[in-house]
Amino acid sequence: MSIGESVHLENVTMRFGDFTAVDDVSLEIEAGEFFSFLGPSGCGKTTILRMISGFNEPSAGRVLIGGRDMRGSGPNRRPTALIFQNLALFPLMPVWENVAFGLEMRGMARSARRRRAEELLDLVALGNAGDKRVADLSGGQRQRVAIARALAVEPKVMLLDEPLSALDLKLRQHMRAELRAIQKRTGVTFIYITHDQGEALTMSDRIAVMSRGRLEQVARPDAVYNEPATPFAASFVGEANIFQGRVVGLSAEEVEIETDLGRMRARNGGDLRQGDRAMLFVRPERSSIALGGDGGRIEAELVEMEFEGSFINLRLRAPNRQPIMVQMANDGGLGEMARMASVPVSFAARAAIALPEGELAHQ
Amino acid sequence: MQALVARYGGPITALMIFTSLVWVLGLLLLPQLTMIDYSFRPALPLAEIGGPKDVYTLENYTFLFGNAGFLTIFAKTIWSSILVTIAAFAICYPLAYYLARGTSIGRARLLIVALIIPYWINEILRTFAWMLILARGGLINMALMELGVIDQPIVFLGQTPTIVLGMVYAYVLFMVFPIYNVLDTLDKAQVEAARDLGAPWWCIHWRIALPHAKPGIAVGCISTFMLAAGSYAVPTILGGPQSRWFTEVIYSQFFEGMNWNRGAAFAFLLLLVCVTFIVIMMRLFRVSLGEVAK
Ligand SMILES: Nc1ncnc2c1ncn2[C@@H]1O[C@H](COP(=O)(O)OP(=O)(O)OP(=O)(O)O)[C@@H](O)[C@H]1O
Ligand SMILES: [Mg+2]
């Protein structure tokens, strides 16, 4: 099987008329990496993928695959295979001919093609579906045919455009694991598009968070979650309580911020200086119902309790009516809290991160 | 049926069924059956109709196969109609593909309107326009003579190729639109997927676009062939004694030879050929009658 190649984007920009869909994106995706683009609808994910696969040429900048400049090479001459958002299987061909289509284009003899197609169908656990019609397959099976069809041409880079979005939750989780396993087994570079953050976090080696055609952050999943680089990344990935204010104190690692709800402390995530406008982010599971906490403390009013089994989501309201979320482990002591008129919410400075004020994701 | 009664009530349903039956039986089936009946009887003077000589016979049919002149015209009509169909397809497939896939929606609409406008003019007038262009002293001959390319006018009219040309022109729309309609439903992602897997452009047509367009091609070919084989105006206007069309022969049997029986037999043979053509096309393109009717 083929081994992956690296993909470099150098100051890539894509304009449609006077609309800039992708704005000066630079990125190095390593060979054999599982790399995801995560961002809201319309942020330019598909456009980036189409530039890598060769369907669109960038208005400015370069795309390099395996170190070679791809300008002027059409999609049929790049070592990439694209799995389309709607899969785009060929409905008039039986399953095996779909899988063998790329080999047919490379002039492989019919019997050899058929054999190779069967091997690939085995790989995606569809061993006996070769003669079926595409229309007779289930959603997940079609998905796997699309993967086998793309693998058949032995691409160095596999491009996947939200391939699981049409599947139901259960199948989606199953296919995530399967895709990841196929990627590991083949060593092909996978570039994966999704607007489902859970998908990006569980599958990827690295994630690029995008907004309006720009990269917000490129990092490992845990880093994106724990060390968001921008307010957009912090609010798009996962839930966060957000407090706005002005920097009033600086120490080696931490900043002190004056907010509507009093002074708060957090890690300095973005080179904040005295007097800067700042946003403080803290995850619900790192906030707690307690008196301690050197980051901040808010007397909040309990609005709702969502019992989720192993944990509990608390929806609260701060004195300035700002909603606050706290997620806590289920330790059996719930009843008492429900009777309290006001609940102390606090968090540790280590658990919170402060960033220069910026745009938030709408969720 | 019950649904109809539930929806419109008994009397209206009865009326609908009655009128449909009158339409199908009285206006379509009965006249055709009468013609078929005619075709198997000898042509007799009025007095002898129903008499002892009025028996069923095949002689109207065998007459055609015994008459070299008519037989040639019959064969040539079919062969030329096939040519018209092939030529129309060769012109219309690229055109339809361009309209459906190769251009913006606005541009495609404009082109479609431009295609339809000539068809607002009556077929006979359109064909006359060709006559003016192709005549002895017509546009083409005048231009060529002016330019000194030729010194004697070329005789276009009365030649079979001219009729084929005229028919292709007269019937292209019946080929373009069925093909355009199916190609319009071809998912752009399929074409791109094929390209991504390494298919050159002709292969995309051969393996993806043409198979997808099959029902439309079948409909287009059937309509064009039937119109060409049954055409009367074009061969009459653009043709001459050497380029007679079988429809003209049928016409002359009916109204010049006053031999309705032979005319009916000839017409029935032409109908048979057309039906055979439909069946062959449907086999060839593996489409069902339901798909064609769409
Ligand atoms: N061919 C085009 N012409 C004009 N605008 C385009 C074209 N292709 C994309 N765009 C615009 O570029 C922007 C980014 O589109 P893109 O398809 O890359 O979004 P996306 O991130 O893939 O969104 P989604 O998650 O909804 O698929 C959109 O605003 C879209 O309207
Ligand atoms: Mg997209």
Image (cartoon, coloured by chain):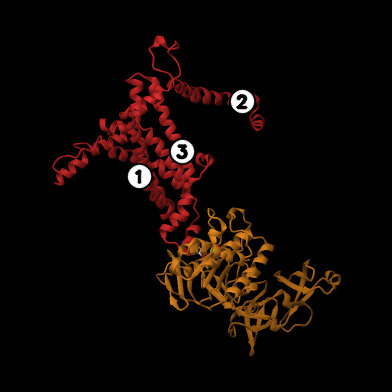
Chain colours: A orange, B red
Report the chain holding disc 1.
B
Give the Cα separation between the discs numbered 3 and 2: 36 Å
x, y (%) of residue A159?
A: 53, 68
Quadrant of the frame with the N terminus of chain A: bottom right
Q: Nearer the viewer, mark 2 or mark 1?
A: 1
The lab-note entry on whether marks 2 and 1 share a chain reads yes
Mark 2 crowd level (few <14, some 14–19, many ≥20, 10 Å Cα): few
Looking at the rendered structure, the kind of residue marked 1 is Ala
Report the chain holding disc 2.
B
Circle 3/circle 2 CB separation < 8 Å: no
- Mark 2 sits on what residue? B12
- Mark 3 sits on what residue? B278
x, y (%) of residue B63?
A: 36, 24
Query: In the picture provided, is B176 more to the left or to the right than B289?
Result: left
User: Residue B257's mark?
Assistant: none
Quadrant of the frame with the C terminus of chain A: bottom right
The residue depicted at 39 percent of the width and 48 percent of the height is B110
x, y (%) of residue B228?
A: 37, 36
